[in-house]
Image (cartoon, rainbow, N blue to C red):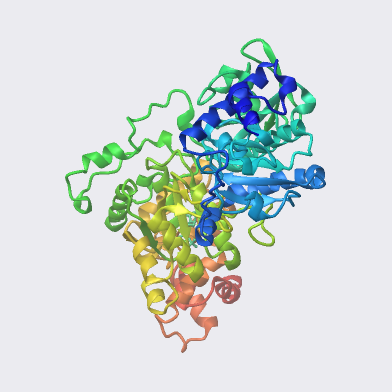
Amino acid sequence: MEKEEKNNKNQHSNENSSEDKTGKATAHKELIQASWYRCEKFGLDHSSQPDFATLPKGILGDLVDQHRSLLETTENEVLPYYENILSNSSCMIVLADRQGHVLNTWGQPRFGSAAQHGLVGGNQWTEMRVGTNAIGTALITGEAIQVGRDEHFLRANRFMVGSASPIYNSNNDLVGVLDISSDAYLPQDHTFGMVKLMSLSVENRLIFSAFQQDHFILSFNTNVVSLDSHWSGILVLDEDGVIVSANRRAEVVLARDLGLLNINQVFDCEMREIKHHPINLPMKLLAMGRYQFYVKVIPPTQQIMRVPDFRRRTGYVMPSKQSPLASSMNALKNKDIAKSNTPITVNKKAIPENVIALDELQHGDERVERLVKQAHKIMEKDIPILIHGETGAGKEIFVRSLHYHSSRASEMLVAVNCAAIPSELVESELFGYEKGAFTGAQTKGSIGLIRRAHRGTLFLDEIGEMPMPVQSRLLRVLQERVVTPLGSTEMYPVDIKLISATNRILKEEVSAGRFRQDLYYRISGLNIELPSLRDRKDKAKLIQFLHNRLREEEPGPELSKEMLDLLVKHPWPGNMRQLVHVLKVGMAMADEEVLEDWHLPDDFFDDMNSDLDTLDDKSDEPLERLIPRLLNEFKGNISQTAKIAGVSRNTVYKYAKPKHESE
Ligand SMILES: Nc1ncnc2c1ncn2[C@@H]1O[C@H](COP(=O)(O)OP(=O)(O)OP(=O)(O)O)[C@@H](O)[C@H]1O
């Protein structure tokens, strides 16, 4: 035995001796030799017993939790190999963390009990404690290695052969090691190849899990039929074609550091072509002008939602990192916003067409003007905004305008109507979920709406409707600024501007125990009361503005002074939504040059009448006399007659007829 040990140290003799002449075998022997020297330095003796420093169960449990995604990925990728190829081979597959702690094992070893071989959860397989071994040596060298029976430094381990391959994540950090150990009856070259393949497939899967939802992934190979194999190179591209991740294979094949290169520096093609290339049709591309590869494009699984952003057009000059309103806000910096009359000037070219400019949200109502300015300013601070207002008052329109006038405008505005999502789905929609997290979950998992709003704005509309358990989770996200998807232990940092809105009185909801008080204080940094339309002082100008805006879209009738008065007097229970609706219907109905009251929808007058019902006591005079009299008095004006009589316009028509006929 001692002679053999000398051989290993000096001549590196082992089961691979037939390969002695090849450079590969020499390199392997040098690795083993270096490991043996290290073991001697660690003070180990060939007769030492392995010291596994087994972790207590609780700590192992924590470690397993920390590595859940690596474990699940390994299990999904590795078990098919085991079941299809290795299950009759009496080998054991082992996953260890980067410190060599065994996290899990699969398979039934033929070579003895757990106490004998030591490949059990919580045992640490490092060179320092266990001598030269596949897991420990692969961790130290960072390379795949096979350790033959006699190559183990400790005699106690010489009954087995281990083949281990390190696993790197998409940041190229070593995250663990995969090992196949057996009692040496397997054809060892095959086992070694297989463990390398398994670790590649785990690495590739880690890259896909991290990026496939919102990035383009390219897989490439010299051979078209191998495109789907784990030996293919993988490149992850952002929207602009910048390589944000790659597998080790890609760097080996292309022989260069690929990080942050643009795809057009690697292959002879532009990102534009990649985006529009059919999914299942491999492209034939040249790398570095001469090496031909087949390239498969895998587009993001989740559609990237993009809003129109005209700033991308040539000719747009970014106002030195300031939002379109920043210059006007700077002018106000030292003044009391509430008292300032300075109008907001906006670079309207920078705002998407369907977004109303901030300065067009108000037309002279001081209260609205002040709150627009306050909210705009707070958009740049780490302070959440809570908007209260009646339904249709324009809360969402306001939020859209705020977002596109802020420094977050180039990122997403994610609007979530908490009342519109079934309560049992709110949680998964908001926080996302790992694949298979619950029955009915999409197999791919979901990033969730909060992470989608990363660096942008998250608008939680109708937040008062949020179920209590979801409120608790949301509170944690706002406190810790990280999201943990359902069924996952991973934490993803998020940077969001939170705006919430409600038409309930949230404080009352808190008192009634329906809304968490701590969450209320978290979301209500700046409280905004968006006035209902009937309470606005700028109604006339606002109506004229909306009317003009609609006429810009399509030619329509003018607004007479009387019509404007009528619209100003309306109670508008449906607020801005109703006003826009009434104007649209009226303008569509009118063939005339001027908008008349009979062009307006009936419910407009119903609201008006119900509002006036209590004003007069008209019960004495029968309608058949009252209505003709009022019509006469108001020169045939139906709506005024209806208003004063406290009846609908239909009723006026009904009682007006005989009178008209007699005239
Ligand atoms: N400032 C505005 N200018 C033009 N139209 C507006 C404006 N504000 C609101 N509207 C119109 O009113 C409709 C309703 O507005 P919005 O959805 O913002 O109201 P809301 O307060 O969020 O309503 P809810 O509480 O019912 O969700 C919009 O679709 C738009 O047509």
Q: Is residue 172 visible?
A: no
View extreme (top): residue: 290
In the displayed structure image, the side of residue 604 where residue 367 appears, left or right: left
Residue 326 coordinates in the image, percent (x, y): 30, 39
**Residue 14: quarter of image:** top right
The residue drawn where x is 33% and y is 60% is: 528
Against 290, residue 516 (above or below) is: below
Residue 313 drawn at (x, y percent): 48, 27
> In x, y percent, where is residue 457?
44, 49
Would you place residue 88 above or below residue 578 in this image?
above
Q: Nearer the viewer, residue 464 or 432?
A: 432
- Looking at the image, the residue that sits furthest to the bottom is 620
Q: Quadrant of the N terminus?
A: top right
Residue 192 in sight in this render:
yes
The one nearer the camera, 93 or 644, is: 93
Q: Is residue 32 above or below residue 99?
A: above
Left or right, 261 with respect to 1, comes to: left
Question: In which image quadrant can residue 181 be found?
Answer: top right
At horizontal 43% and vertical 61% (from top left) the residue drawn is 476
